[in-house]
Image (cartoon, helix red, strand yellow):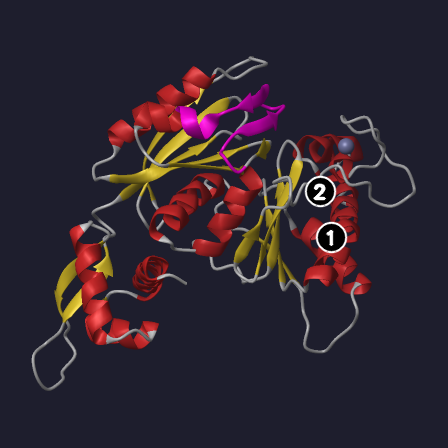
Amino acid sequence: VRPRHGRRHNLSLVRQTLYFDGPMSRADLARATGLTRVTISDLVTELLECGHARELGTSSDVRPGKPSTLIDINRPGLQIIGLDLTAHRVLRGAVLDLDGVVLARTERRVDDVAVVDLADVLDLARETVALATAPVLGVGVGTPGLVSEDGMVRSASNLGWTDVPLRDELATATGLPVQVANDAASAARAAYTLLGASDDFLLVRIGRGVGSSLIVGGTQLLGAHHAAGEIGHVTVGNDGGATCRCGKVGCLETWLSAPNLERALTAADGSAEPLVEAGTRLGIAIAPVIAALDLTEIVLSGPEHLLTAPLVEAAQSTIDSRLLRHPDVHVAVNVAADPDDIVLRGAAGLVLSSQLGVI
Ligand SMILES: [Zn+2]
């Protein structure tokens, strides 16, 4: 590690410590990070100068000597723009604070179009940036489809896009740093940074399709083709099933995507059987992944009226029955809070991670 990299790492460590545990004094920050008082003092000065941290007045602790000044991440002084391109027929934007709370919203209807016009997304971004009331740290975007490392949307059938350089176009339009991820990766970021998920989990996102994203050892896995977590078109079982929109038979999506599940529930006339079947198929599909990676948690993200007890319990019992029994190992299946805003908040989390090193 060269000194410059060491300093960058230490700045991230300080920002991360303040973000999750602040406000605190310089002395407490030194203790929490294991860095020296002199180093902390120097790093804090840099963070105060660039606006990433702020001083909050003095500690109320009764200690001998001079009361110490508290330092915090600059929560009121910085904002983030989030965009969610996954909702049906509407593009959504928001101004968020550093804790992922939505402060203002924007949206743009895209009724009945096969191809979403990139200009609409750029206009929405500019309109949302204009609503910010503090300096903007960056723009985060959760989009359907496959996203490459350089923020290019390789293919997103729901938007009608192939090879759209979304990150670069948004950076030019707004003059801000931009992070683009697919919606499952974005939701996983929200679950991890803002909603308290564990260090080793699989987030399964149920929407028009089925996607997932893996966080292992606190690190988001992207895969060799940035397609890690694309489980929607994995064939589940060898007992057939419905024909999928991809042309194969028995893809996970044929049971679990929101439109397919809603259709099955309508046909079942009040029976919860389609929910049990969907949860069971999900459990079959992901049990080997859980075992291979030693995960502790499955987080389900999607419409509240579908992620109900019959589906969750079927997934849980299927997973439990298919993994090696071990008294110390329990894999919890949980439903993510805040389904409507999880992609927007995750998009903000992407910016927190890239710009402040908060993960
Ligand atoms: Zn398929």
What mark, if any, has residue 286 been given in the picture?
A: 1
Residue at the extreme front: 2
Residue stretch rendered in magenta on the structure = 149-169
Give me the disc on residue 231: 2
Mark 1–mark 2 Cα distance, whole angstroms, equals 9 Å
Q: Is mark 2 within 8 Å of ligand 1?
A: no
Disc nearer the start of the sequence (1/2): 2
Residue 152 painted magenta: yes
Quarter of the rendered structure image containing ligand 1: top right
Q: Residues within 10 Å of mark 2 (few under 14, many from 20)?
A: many
Res. 80 image quadrant: top left
Quadrant in which the N terminus is drawn = bottom left
Q: How packed is label 1: few (under 14 Cα within 10 Å), some, or many (20 or more)?
A: many
Residue 96 visible in the picture: yes
Location of residue 160 in the rendering, given as x and y in whole percent from the top left corner: 59, 19
Query: Which numbered circle lies on residue 212?
Result: none
Q: Is residue 115 above or below residue 329?
A: above
| Rendered location of residue 311, percent (x, y) | 70, 49
Quarter of the rendering containing residue 46: bottom left
Q: Is residue 252 left or right of residue 24?
A: right
